[in-house]
Image (tube, rainbow, N blue to C red):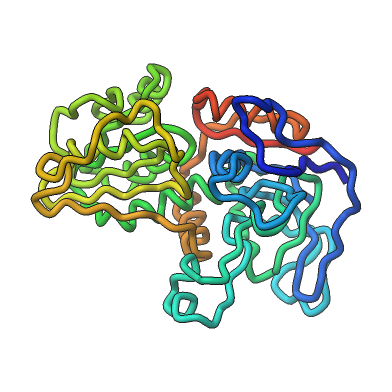
Amino acid sequence: MKAMILNNIRDLTINKEPLELVEIPVPVPKEGELLVKISACGVCHTELDEIEGRTPPPYFPIIPGHQVVGRVEKLGGGTKSFKIGDRVGIAWIFSACGKCKFCLGGNENLCYDFKATGRDANGGYAEYMTVREDFANCIPEVFSDAEAAPLLCAGAIGYRSIKLSGLKDGQNLGLTGFGASAHLALKMVRYRFPHVQVFVFARSDQERDFARELGAVWAGDTIDDAPEKLDCIIDTTPVWKPIVEALRNLEKGGRLVINAIRKESVDKECLLELDYPAHLWLEKEIKSVANVARSDVREFLQLAAEAGIKPEVHEYNLEEANRALLEIKDKKIRGAKVLIPN
């Protein structure tokens, strides 16, 4: 099968083709696993974090990709939940132990043995992959393969971020950054909270125009002052400066939710220091989002199907993975990018 593999950590400012196209054997499903023939795989900023070493894979080579849609090609022994031909989705959560206090409490995303698709196990930048059947997700028929792929991470992590924000109808919500996750979050909020006003902070005119098209009441630069204080803000950027700026726009007692696996260690534009009275005082909160649980993925897929929430997608051939990644690195973002194996 064809696969795009990462052989070691790369600096994308120097190496513009971090992934190599190779031919490798089709994996064989083990007991309790499915072999999935991949039809679409979303491209996520987290892949940049893996490639550049902010959340490095534990071994090389590795096949990235964690927003995977495909059909069951072969069943491993003992499988019961799926049959050959079923369409399934594979998200960032590849597996968890199922026995620790976090798993038993419904927070398997915090499991010490949490494994991520495309980082701790081979992912979807390929023609086939295997997954445990209990970590495969049913895809509602209303979505095409390409539409479903970004819902598995960009959508699900946005869903978890909104839950963690404590947002209530009638409040003001801020979204910092407006890529794949934020544009789905805005659609979700408009469906679930019809009286919430959404304010978007984004660096490019294109992103700000896109936010207004989708119903944002205001869109400005990340350094701008919103016209009103915001009860909740969800940050989806890879850098530090938007966090400091967001805290300045947060209402007393408000909550900032950081929707990112990692932040870039050096933000050349962030010359601001955290000022306690201006940024944190008056009972403001900061909360991070760590991964997703299976329940987040499955609840969001159902919600998206009911609400008709679909991402704007831009398709690339599997061999164009490097180009799609570099466009994300260069902030050429509108909606979500999806790889389609030939």
Q: Position of residue 238 (x, y in %)?
A: 44, 38
Q: Position of residue 158 (x, y in %)?
A: 42, 48
Q: Is residue 46 above or below residue 83?
A: above
Q: Quadrant of the C terminus?
A: top right
> Seen in the image, is 311 located left or right of residue 72?
left
Quadrant assignment, res 225: top left
Residue drawn at 22 percent across, 51 percent down: 255
> Seen in the image, is 116 located left or right of residue 1?
left
Quadrant assignment, res 245: top left
Q: Position of residue 180 (x, y in %)?
A: 49, 37
Residue drawn at 37 percent across, 52 percent down: 161
> Seen in the image, is 326 located left or right of residue 180?
right
Q: Is residue 139 above or below residue 32?
A: above
Of 146 and 268, the residue lying toward us? 268
Residue drawn at 33 percent across, 25 percent down: 212
Quadrant assignment, res 339: top right
> Seen in the image, is 289 located left or right of residue 334?
left
Residue drawn at 56 percent across, 67 percent down: 114
Quick one: which residue is furthest to the top in this view? 205
Of 188 and 296, the residue lying toward us? 296
